[in-house]
Image (cartoon, rainbow, N blue to C red):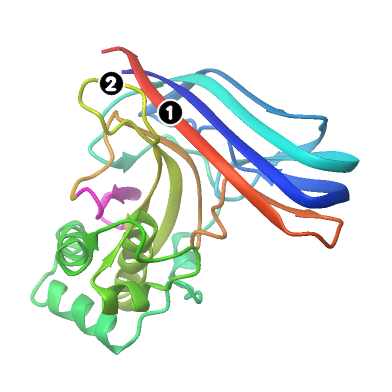
């Protein structure tokens, strides 16, 4: 499938800031199921800095904007060719050992309830791929998709207690559950063309990847949509949790408040 993406993030500052520095994970991954055809990231008034490919295989690019500045726009536009690999991430070059992703973080740390859910889900399961599917299904059942009830800092344990959340909460809960039973897991940020007819809509998305030793690869699980990523998905980058995998991270030199407005649209132009 050929997918086009338009992603605009507008930052506004209450008072002009002296400058802004940002680190972007906004370049699509390259692997057997995904190849970028054309891709451009622009920052209004920005200066392109250094870039590098990190140990997880993600491209990280820095930008700086000299001040004084009251408003910054980060605009992403491009085309990506995707193929359904049933969630398997093959052909992706990275150098970090999967065991690194057993490390717990504040958003993904399992409490007693999440640990119990994970243990019950994999009881009697000897196949790691089957265990991963069971964990994803258990999280899907335990947390209903409902926007507006959680926020950016909601933890996996809190979302499970609420029984509701969004894709970030599903990903964090699945990661926490997988790590609780000894399966390396990580957070993935990207895009999803959710509309069957290919019409434009907001499409920022997140899911989890679990390392399956028998397959010797990462396998994606989207507990929010009860499926594995297919050719409707575009993978940007990964990390231990949402903050670690954030497409845009940065800091502004100033004392005023910051607000942002995000618009993301993805469209299929060819089957």
Q: Indicate the quadrant containing the C terminus: top left, top right, bottom left or bottom right.
A: top left
Say which quarter of the image contains residue 123: bottom left
**Secondary structure type for disc 2:** loop
Q: Residue furthest left?
A: 124
Q: Nearer the viewer, residue 72 or 171?
A: 72
Magenta residues span 212-225
Relative placement, left or right, of 55 versus 237 is: right
Relative placement, left or right, of 105 versus 9 is: left
How many C-alpha atoms fall within 10 Å of the one at disc 2: few (<14), some, or many (≥20)?
Answer: some
Magenta stretch: residue 215 in it? yes
* Residue that mark 1 sits on: 265
Relative placement, left or right, of 189 versus 201 is: right
Residue 200 image position (x, y, % from top left)? 36, 24
* Residue that mark 2 sits on: 198
How many C-alpha atoms fall within 10 Å of the one at disc 1: few (<14), some, or many (≥20)?
Answer: some
Counting residues from the start of the chain, the first of labels 2 and 1 encountered is: 2
Residue 258 image position (x, y, % from top left)? 70, 55
């Amino acid at each position: 499938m050929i997918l086009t993406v338009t992603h605009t993030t507008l930052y506004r500052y209450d008072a002009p800031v002296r400058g802004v520095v940002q680190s972007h994970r906004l370049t699509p991954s390259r692997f057997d199921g995904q190849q970028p055809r054309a891709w451009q990231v622009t920052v209004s008034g920005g200066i392109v800095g250094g870039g590098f490919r990190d140990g997880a295989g993600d491209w990280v690019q820095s930008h700086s904007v000299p001040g004084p500045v009251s408003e910054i726009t980060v605009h992403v536009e491009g085309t990506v060719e995707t193929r359904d690999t049933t969630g398997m991430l093959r052909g992706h070059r990275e150098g970090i050992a999967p065991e690194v992703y057993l490390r717990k973080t504040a958003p993904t740390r399992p409490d007693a309830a999440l640990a119990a859910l994970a243990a019950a889900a994999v009881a009697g399961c000897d196949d790691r791929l089957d265990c991963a599917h069971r964990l994803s299904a258990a999280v899907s059942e335990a947390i209903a998709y409902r926007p507006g009830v959680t926020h950016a800092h909601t933890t996996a344990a809190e979302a499970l207690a609420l029984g509701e959340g969004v894709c970030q909460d599903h990903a964090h809960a699945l990661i926490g559950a997988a790590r609780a039973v000894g399966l390396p897991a990580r957070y993935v940020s990207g895009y999803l063309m959710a509309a069957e007819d290919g019409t434009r809509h907001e499409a920022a998305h997140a899911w989890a990847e679990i390392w399956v030793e028998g397959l010797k690869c990462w396998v994606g699980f989207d507990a929010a949509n009860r499926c594995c990523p297919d050719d409707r998905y575009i993978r940007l980058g990964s990390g231990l949790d949402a903050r670690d995998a954030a497409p845009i991270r940065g800091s502004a030199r100033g004392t005023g408040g910051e607000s942002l407005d995000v618009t993301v649209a993805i469209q299929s132009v060819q089957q």
